[in-house]
Every structure is written in C-alpha cells, then in structure tokens.
Amino acid sequence: MSSLTFIIKSGLDKFDDKEGYKIPHMGWNQIANLRTPLFKDIDEGAYIYYVHSYYPELCEDTIATTRYINAFSGALGRDNFFGTQFHPEKSGAVGAQILKNFLEL
C-alpha cells in the first residue's frame, strides 16, 4: 500500500485476485454516496467507465464510492482539488455532466 499524502490521506491498493472478477477492472460500474457540487444533477447509482488495477481506499475525502471486489473511493475531493478514479471523458452523458459541473465550480 502506498499513500496519497500530498493532498489527501488515503491508501492506494491493488485489487486482489478474486474468482469472477477481471483485473484490470475495465467497464461500466455505478457510483454512489455522491457528495459535493461536482455531482450536481447526477443520480445515485449512475454508471461511469473504469480502467484500473489500483484503487484509493475510502477516507474522509471520499466524495463518491464504487464497489468492485470491495468498496473504494470513486472520487476524492478536498478544498479545490477533485480527482476521479473513473474516466469522465469515457462515461457518456454522466461524464459530460461531471466535467460541466467541474468547470462551473
């Protein structure tokens, strides 16, 4: 585990091998527990697109969660910093709305 200590304090882990799950995680998955105006007009459970083998752990800066093998931070935020584990540019209308919201912050 490494630590993202410059802006947020969250561990970073690699997904464990688990039967029925592919790594890297590639494809559509849902986001939940949406916090902050970054997710204005985004529904709980909306689908977004991922391509990753590592994930940020849940922490006080988690502003959206996703579950794949285990729950993790789908997005993190602190002050004027926002980071997404998913690819908004590949996430269709939901991703376009997130990018629009970011530009309007």
Image (cartoon, rainbow, N blue to C red):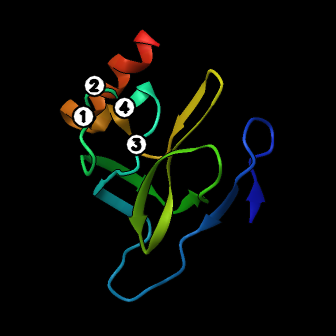
Residue of label 1: 94
In the image, is residue 19 above or below residue 92? below
Residue 34 badge: 3
Mark found first going from the N terminus, 4 or 3: 3
Mark found first going from the N terminus, 4 or 2: 4
**What residue type is disc 3 on?**
Leu
Residue of label 4: 39
Q: Which mark is in front, 1 or 4?
A: 4
Mark found first going from the N terminus, 1 or 4: 4
Secondary structure type for disc 2: helix
In the image, is residue 78 above or below residue 32? above
Left or right, 85 with reference to 59: left
Report the Cα–Cα distance between label 4 and label 3: 6 Å
* Residue 55 position in % (x across, y down): 56, 59
Q: In the orientation shown, which residue stands out farthest toward the bottom? A: 19
Q: Please say if the residues under marks 4 and 3 sit with CB atoms less than 8 Å apart.
A: yes
Report the Cα–Cα distance between label 1 and label 2: 5 Å
- Around disc 1, counting alpha carbons within 10 Å, would you say few (fewer than 14), some (14 to 19), or many (20 or more)? many
Secondary structure type for disc 3: loop
* Residue 20 position in % (x across, y down): 32, 84
